[in-house]
Image (spheres, grey):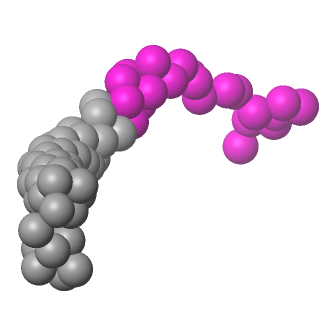
Amino acid sequence: MLSGVLQSPRAIEVNIAIMKAFIRLKEMVSLNAEMEAKFSELERRIGRHDKYIRELFAAIRKLMAPIDPPKPPIGFRTED
């Protein structure tokens, strides 16, 4: 505030530097907000795909599981 009131060349330079810093800060905040939105969208997409990928792997594992033929009973059999 003082740099805006004072009329010396140094005070004017400081005031300009402060304004540039605030402009840069505003740009960084808007960039971060944009990045946050993009990350949220990506996270939402990946989350949805993860479910489908898990289902796909489960189906593949079912298909890969060996089918065990029924085993004949062990032991002596009598004819009734």
Identify the image quadrant of residue 68: top right
Classify residue 64 as left or right of residue 6: right
Which image quadrant: the C terminus? Answer: top right
Classify residue 51 as left or right of residue 78: left
Q: Is residue 26 magenta?
A: no
Residue at far front of view: 8
Horizontal and vertical percent for residue 20?
14, 51
Horizontal and vertical percent for residue 70?
59, 28
> Residue at position x 29%, y 42% from top?
50
Residue 69: in sight, yes or no? yes
Q: Main secondary structure of the magenta part?
A: loop
Q: Nearer the viewer, residue 33 or 23?
A: 23
The image shows a total of numbered marks equal to: 0
Residue 18: in sight, yes or no? no
Q: Is residue 59 magenta?
A: yes
Q: Nearer the viewer, residue 80 or 38?
A: 38
Magenta-drawn segment = 57-80
Classify residue 71 as left or right of residue 22: right
Work out whether 7 lies above or below 47: below
